[in-house]
Image (cartoon, rainbow, N blue to C red):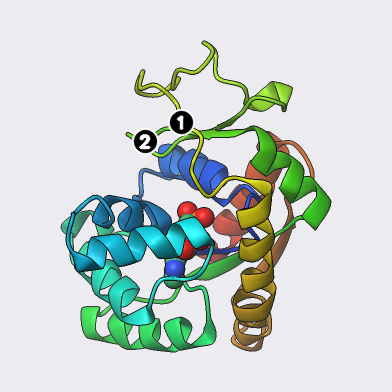
Amino acid sequence: MESIIFIAPPAAGKGTQSKMLCDAYHIPHISTGDLLREASLVEDARGIYIKNQISSGALVSDEIILELLKERLKQSDCNNGYILDGFPRNIEQAQAYEGILEELNKKLGIVIYLEVDKKLASKRIEGRMSCPNCGSVYNTIIEEAKPKQDGICDRCGQTLIKRGDDNSETFGIRYDTYLEKTNPLIKYYEDKKVLYRVSSANNKNETFQEISSILKRSNEL
Ligand code: AMP
């Protein structure tokens, strides 16, 4: 199975689509944001640094992210493809990732660019609730994205939380960081002919269907 990389601004629906794909295709969902949130719980200098970067909306150093990701990709559940959500975030990470792939004898796969405009992304951030246990994402102001029971994760029953960086001020910084650092990856992957554009303005099932058909076609090639 081809691995999938998601490139998208914050709150475009990467996490939601990743979970849906991971359920449908039984491949792991690797969110670098989740890896970092977990690493930030360790109370040492690195943990504190990661926590500060996340809460200010800035990127964590490439060195840390590459180390965490490489360890994760070595695990055997990544042998038949995986979904990368939140990585790479800049050209340097994309280049370093190619070295990791070579070392681990893995292929690049396909890149999905989830398009969403800033206004809609900002609205999604306002109501977004996340599960600290399984990473599922909900939204209290979008009818189809509400949890079945208020404040409780449908998937694992954990109490949902509002992420500390899901506020309008940090969103603005994260969005600007995305434009400056991550957006250039669209051309980078377009040039490699692995990029597919998908609008995330529709409902999540339509977006999922579109991604599934891209995946089906690319796995048949
Ligand atoms: P996310 O869960 O993808 O929205 O990421 C939350 C935060 O984690 C980001 O705002 C960054 O501070 C950090 N982060 C996640 N992925 C990366 C990455 N690939 N490189 C650097 N920082 C990252």
Observer able to see residue 166: yes
Q: Secondary structure at mark 2?
A: loop
* Horizontal arrangement in the rendering, residue 175 relative to residue 132 (left or right): right
Crowd around label 2: few <14 · some 14–19 · many ≥20 (10 Å)? some
Q: Which mark is residue 161?
A: 1
Q: Which mark is residue 177?
A: none
Q: Is mark 2 within 8 Å of ligand 1?
A: no
Residue type at mark 1: give it.
Ile
Count of labels in the image: 2
Q: Which of the pair 156/195 is nearer the observer?
A: 156
- The earlier-in-sequence mark between 2 and 1 is 2
Residue 112 is situated, as x and y percent measured from the top left of the image, at 61, 63
Point 40% across, 61% down: residue: 52
Against 1, residue 38 (above or below) is above
Residue 214 is situated, as x and y percent measured from the top left of the image, at 63, 58
Point 69% across, 24% down: residue: 144
Residue 57 falls in which quadrant of the image?
bottom right
Q: Which of the pair 210/57 is nearer the observer?
A: 57
Residue type at mark 2: give it.
Pro
Observer able to see residue 84: no
Quarter of the N terminus within the rendering: bottom left
Point 36% across, 18% down: residue: 157
Q: Which residue is mark 2?
A: 132
Residue 126 is situated, as x and y percent measured from the top left of the image, at 68, 38
* Horizontal arrangement in the rendering, residue 179 relative to residue 39 (left or right): right
* Horizontal arrangement in the rendering, residue 26 relative to residue 204 (left or right): left
Point 62% across, 47% down: residue: 13
Residue placed farthest to the top in the image?
149
Query: Given contact means CB atoms under 8 Å apart, are the residues at marks 2 and 1 in contact?
Result: yes
Residue 116 is situated, as x and y percent measured from the top left of the image, at 76, 55
Against 4, residue 167 (above or below) is above
Residue 194 falls in which quadrant of the image?
bottom right
